[in-house]
Amino acid sequence: MPRIAYVNGRYVPHAEAAVHIEDRGYQFADGVYEVVPVFRGQMVDEELHLDRLERSLSELRIEMPMSRQALRMITAEVMRRNRLDNGFVYMQITRGVAPRDHKFPKHAKPAVVMSVRQTKLHGDEAIHDGVKVVTQPDLRWARRDIKSVSLLPNCLAKQSAHEAGASEAWLVEEDGTITEGTSTNAWILTEDNKLVTRKADSSILNGITRVSLIKCAEAKGIAFEERPFTPEEAYRAREAFLTSSSNFVMPVTEIDGRTIGNGHAGLLTLKLRQAYVDSVATPGKRSRD
Ligand code: PDD
């Protein structure tokens, strides 16, 4: 079955899905995106992702190109045409096509594309082993709360991590604290048993998985602190993990070559992962807990 994408009002074969060379997303990274996980044929936290999409657009003064209901219908149709079971929906909205000029164009219409990718869920062994992380300088702009398609510093840091044999880079601000990963949020369980993740201000993207996991932790009575932490504090952590739409909750078992805990997924990490997966498998559970 051929993959189908949505491009500006049309459903087209993925291989033929293309935008104009003067799309401002292509020339200026003048656009935003969302990655919405799909689990057993259902979108996870769709409304939270659409809230964040609308917020990113409004921060960049890009018009919402259609109603939320219309966006929902297109996502459902793209999922249906691709028979998406597990994976994610990628949606991107740019300021549109206009002659190249840094100023906002007067008449451009926002451009919308959507595609899906089928992925496999991580197996138990991958979760048990966790992933390696290295630290890298955070070279990004000051508005990381906007989910903009301008991801060059993220790509450079991820490539460095890959070349160092790691799966993710945790980015370090000039003040020496970790902000987040290149495409994930960062968490530790400190040596004195405090669950810590950075506060969601303009220094990080407020991950939807992060937000939902906080709800799971609250429902289970697990205390957490929202504050910055340093690589040194992370090296001494009992446990560490990362969160994102594509990883859910993934244990981190090594940071900059230092083994975290016993080198395998930590108990609290596994408990939180299970709570998150349960809440995804039975939507509405979080609010009932
Ligand atoms: N990345 N931080 C950054 C910089 C991100 O790009 C992402 C998401 C996250 C986690 O957000 P969420 O829990 O909403 O997925 C944190 C997506 C998955 C990506 O770029 O592919």
Image (cartoon, helix red, strand yellow):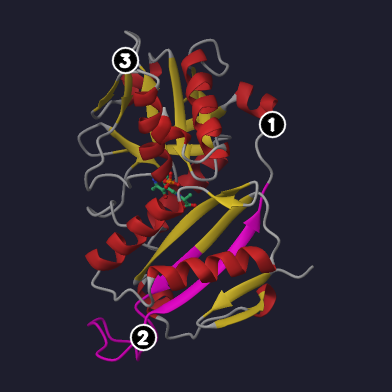
Q: Which residue is mark 3?
A: 194
Amino acid type for the residue under numbered disc 1: Gly
Q: Spatial distance from mark 2 to mark 1, Cα to Cα? A: 43 Å
- Does residue 100 show up magenta in the picture? yes
Question: In the rendered structure, which disc, 3 or 1, sits on the residue that comes first in sequence?
Answer: 1
Extreme-top residue of the structure: 192
Label 1 beta carbon less than 8 Å to ligand 1: no
Amino acid type for the residue under numbered disc 3: Lys
Q: Which quarter of the image is occupied by the C terminus?
A: top left
Q: Secondary structure at mark 1?
A: loop
Label 2 beta carbon less than 8 Å to ligand 1: no
Residue 248, above or below 229? below
| Quadrant assignment, res 68 | bottom left
Q: Spatial distance from mark 3 to mark 2, Cα to Cα? A: 48 Å
Mark 2 surroundings within 10 Å by alpha-carbon count, few (fewer than 14), some (14 through 19), many (20 or more): some
Residue 93 placement, left or right of 44: left
Residue 157, above or below 223? below
The answer to whether residue 257 is visible is no
Q: Which residue is mark 1?
A: 123
- Does residue 245 show up magenta in the picture? no
Mark 1 surroundings within 10 Å by alpha-carbon count, few (fewer than 14), some (14 through 19), many (20 or more): few
